[in-house]
Image (cartoon, rainbow, N blue to C red):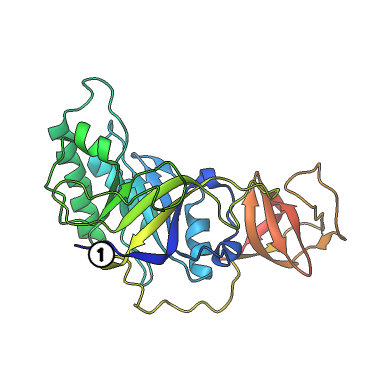
Amino acid sequence: MAIQFADFIGIDVSQYNGTIQWIDVASDPQKIKFAYMKATEGTTLQDPSFKYNRKGANSVGIRNGAYHFYSLVTPPEQQAENFLKVVQQLGTSDLAPMLDIEKIPAQNQITPEKLVADLHTWIDIVERSLGCKPIIYSYRNYWETVLKSPTSFTEYPLWIANYGKVDSPTSNNPAPSPFPGWETYAIWQYTSKGAVKGITDGRGKPLNVDLNKYNLSSGFLELNTPFVPVTDNSIMEGSVNTDKLNIRSGAGKEFNLIAMPLPQNQEVTILGEENGWYKVRTEIEGWVSKTYIDIKP
């Protein structure tokens, strides 16, 4: 099957990408049309940025999905339970869940046959619960040397991680071929060192982010399906729960005060979060301590 890359790209993110300003992401000239965000890892880890990122992407009309980073040392049933507890159910604009398979086992930790069987268990549970086939993410060397090139997953969409000599898909960085057994793949992650508007350290310095090309011929994203309309671009709403709340130019007490304190019960729009501080908008934008903001349901 021919590979036909779209004229837009996607990102995949986690808490390590900082507090993402999704309004800025949506205005990036690279045209970010889809996003995946880490939800869980293993049986207990739940990414603290997941709900914020999911709501933020939805608020600006970027289709998005959740992913699970697979652990080799815990039961697949419990890992699936952890993932489903966080994701709960898919909305009309959500993409299929993704299973991230890249953890290298220690010597004699698990056999390829056992790992393949466990991965099928996770996939089967999630597919039955959410009603759609997960997409599988991995890289060729892992697939061939750790898993021994199984062909029992080929009914599921494939997402290939393959980084070339440059950080963009050009003639010097040719598209990879599918793994054995697949005719094609849906997504190609071509760099882990991309730069996107709205993904910074909070002081304007860009943070590295994974960038992905989408293969139109796979039909995976189904971008022609209607997106649920969003009435405004706010991410979260809150109100001040103290008498006078200082507004600062950055996320910390070392930053300057930039306006008169906010009064109790003042409503604010929350644009971001960093190190125990919220970036808020009233008549102006600034940073306030999370302690003194109550989130509206």
Viewer-side residue, 184 vs 199: 184
Q: Can residue 75 be seen in this view?
A: no
Q: Which residue lies at the image location 28% right of the left edge and 65% below the top edge?
A: 220
- Classify mark 1: residues with Cα within 10 Å, few (<14), some (14-19) or many (20+): many
Q: Which residue lies at the image location 53% right of the left edge and 57% below the top edge?
A: 52
- The tally of labels here is 1
Q: Can residue 51 be seen in this view?
A: yes
> In the rendered view, does 137 fall on the left or right side of 66?
left
Amino acid type, label 1? Ser
Residue lying farthest right? 260
> In the rendered view, does 1 fall on the left or right side of 57?
left
The quadrant of the picture occupied by the C terminus is: bottom right
Indicate whether 201 appears above or below 55.
above
Residue lying farthest front? 171
Q: Where is residue 226 in the image (x, y as percent from the top left)?
A: 38, 79
The residue indicated by pointer 1 is 218
Q: Position of residue 235 (x, y in %)?
A: 58, 65
Indicate whether 214 appears above or below 83.
below
Viewer-side residue, 40 vs 136: 136
Q: Which residue lies at the image location 65% right of the left edge and 62% below the top edge?
A: 270
The quadrant of the picture occupied by the N terminus is: bottom left
Viewer-side residue, 32 vs 102: 32
Q: Position of residue 164 (x, y in %)?
A: 39, 43
Kind of element beneath mark 1: helix
Q: Position of residue 290 (x, y in %)?
A: 68, 51
Q: Which residue lies at the image location 31% right of the left edge and 36% below the top edge?
A: 71
Viewer-side residue, 135 vs 48: 135
> In the rendered view, does 243 fall on the left or right side of 157?
right
Which quadrant of the figure has residue 6?
A: bottom left
